[in-house]
Image (cartoon, helix red, strand yellow):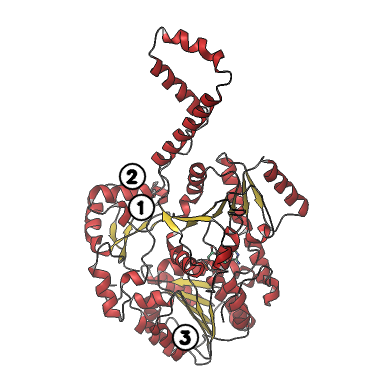
Amino acid sequence: MVVNETDEGPGFADLALGPELLKALNGLGYEEPTPIQREAIPPLLEGRDLLGQAATGTGKTAAFALPMLQRLHAGRHPVAMENGGGEPAGLVLVPTRELAIQVSEAMHRYGRDLGTRVLPIYGGQPIGRQLRALERGVDVVVATPGRALDHIGRGTLPLKGLRMVVLDEADEMLDMGFADDIEAILQDTPEDRQTVLFSATMPPRIDGIARRHLREPVRIRIEREAPAAGEAPLIRQSAYIVSRAYKPAALGRVLDVEAPTAAIVFCRTREEVDSLTETMNGRGYRAEALHGGMGQEQRDRVMGRLRSGTADLLVATDVAARGLDIEQLTHVINYDVPSAPESYVHRIGRVGRAGREGVAITLAEPREHRMLKTIERVTRSKIAVEKVPTVADLRARRLELTRAALQESLMEDGDLDRFRVVVETLADEFDLVDIALAAVKLAHESTGAAADEEEIPEVTPRPQRAERGGPRDDRFARDDRRGRRGGGAMSRVFVGAGRSAGVRPQDIVGAITGETHVSGREIGAIEIADRFTLVEIPDAAVDEVVAALRRTTIKGRKPIVRRDRDGAPRGRR
Ligand code: AMP
């Protein structure tokens, strides 16, 4: 089955989800299911197996989590609930510690009113804590395969009560050498379980797993031929890769450099719309929010302000912006990568009309890079990944605007004469060029051009499967990962200082580029947690980086620095 997005598809309420889940989704500001959710949720609720091709950013987590929560809740054993004990009925296998945490947090949020107990287990976390939590009883375990197998070996993760198993990002798990672990785990689960497999790519090895372990699965992928190319509007398309923490700053930077007449910024949820609108107003932009939670009168007021030019930035969800036609719109900005190629096409089609060039800009997180590639392929268009404008670019652009304003003023040669007396009296004492320079400075500063001088760190996207050489077996995957530098194989370095120590991405980038041969471009995603930081480094440079960071101080400290083992291929854990 190929997902087919139409403008008015079914809402969450049409998908037979229970009231508790609907309430949670409403509270999170989700306005409508993404295409993958629309297709996956009904068959999963019926108990079917499912094979889904979907990358991060499509909403795949909720696509399996919502049916899982509903089905497990419906079949939950009342005695186990009362005693607080009970064996897990759901198991989600994921490739990395981050994803384990992310998926279990999402499930916890969705399942709050159902009282579902979700536990992430992954390598690197003390096993004792996990043992105690498992003993108390959980409903769903979200685990990396290696650590799951450890627990199964100890007899602390019983599999016989499992009713649903999900393999998330299966291709990533295979790339990381988890194939045998996955097979071993699945062998031990009950035969009549429901099985879901999501993978961004579908190489033959994934097909093999699906054939062995899935029963007549429903197949879903979110690729569909793009609309007829002949009608394609004139649109300059580009993307910036930025980490989440820098998105508001990056949006501001892009708006300053692009200077749109009017722009629409698309967000995924109502909550995101509200908070981004507030942030952008705080940064001095005239932004208005538009989402499905607003009444008609409110919406009319917002549109009025946009049309009259009192506002120049509309921050909206897809649902709210549907059917809007704004004449003066020059820019569409995707604050996140859209959940399907069709919604990308819908969004950007709002500019580039009537022969005028429009601009579409996407802010993507490193992990969403694959979705960007899918959109490019399906829409058969090129989305140029560009460097986020630097502070220097911004200054140059602002000077250019000041220069253009002065040029305009000179060409209009209106009533400049009344200022002659100022220049002439100063000329007795100063050089004419110096006087002009001082005047330009004043004019420039009066535009408020001093704000937002924060440098936004450049991040490289996660390496693509193809770039890694498409490993064919686990051993090859490991060798490939060890061997290359700059060719895409990345490993992570753990630094024992994070947000609470004031660490910012630029501190990490500065320390690495200052002390090693690694350039800023080679550094991958940087994740800063409260107490630690994880940074992706070309695998071949990890030892050099670890040694160098151990010698230097970061924010005046000498934190623990080591290769992060959770994401490493098995055999070295
Ligand atoms: P995923 O592809 O599962 O990693 O999800 C990507 C992001 O989309 C997450 O931040 C989700 O919270 C968000 N999301 C998932 N489904 C929806 C939806 N139906 N509406 C709005 N946001 C969503």
The residue at 61%/41% (across/down) is: 286
Mark 2 lies on residue: 555
Q: Earlier in the sequence, mark 1 or mark 3?
A: 3
Q: Is residue 372 above or below residue 513?
A: below
Q: Residues within 10 Å of mark 3 (few under 14, many from 20)?
A: many
Q: Residues within 10 Å of mark 2 (few under 14, many from 20)?
A: some
Q: Nearer the viewer's eye, disc 3 or disc 2? A: 2
Is residue 529 among what the camera can see? Answer: no
Q: Earlier in the sequence, mark 1 or mark 2?
A: 1
Between residues 369 and 163, which one lies in front from this camera angle? 369
User: Which quadrant of the figure shows ligand 1?
Assistant: bottom right
For the residues labelled 3 and 2, the Cα–Cα distance comes to 46 Å
In the rendered image, which quarter is residue 145 located in?
bottom left
In the rendered image, which quarter is residue 296 located in?
bottom right
Q: Residues within 10 Å of mark 1 (few under 14, many from 20)?
A: many
Q: How far from the left and from the top, in percent, is residue 546?
A: 25, 57
Image quarter of the C terminus: bottom left
**Contact between labelled residues 2 and 1, with CB atoms less than 8 Å apart:** yes
Q: Is residue 437 left or right of residue 27?
A: left
Q: Is residue 318 left or right of residue 162?
A: right
Picture disc at residue 497: 1
**Contact between labelled residues 3 and 1, with CB atoms less than 8 Å apart:** no
For the residues labelled 1 and 2, the Cα–Cα distance comes to 9 Å
Q: Earlier in the sequence, mark 3 or mark 2?
A: 3
Q: How far from the left and from the top, in percent, is residue 267?
A: 58, 57
**SS assignment at label 2:** loop
Mark 3 lies on residue: 159
Q: Amino acid at mark 3?
A: Leu
Give the number of callouts: 3
**SS assignment at label 1:** loop
The residue at 46%/21% (across/down) is: 439
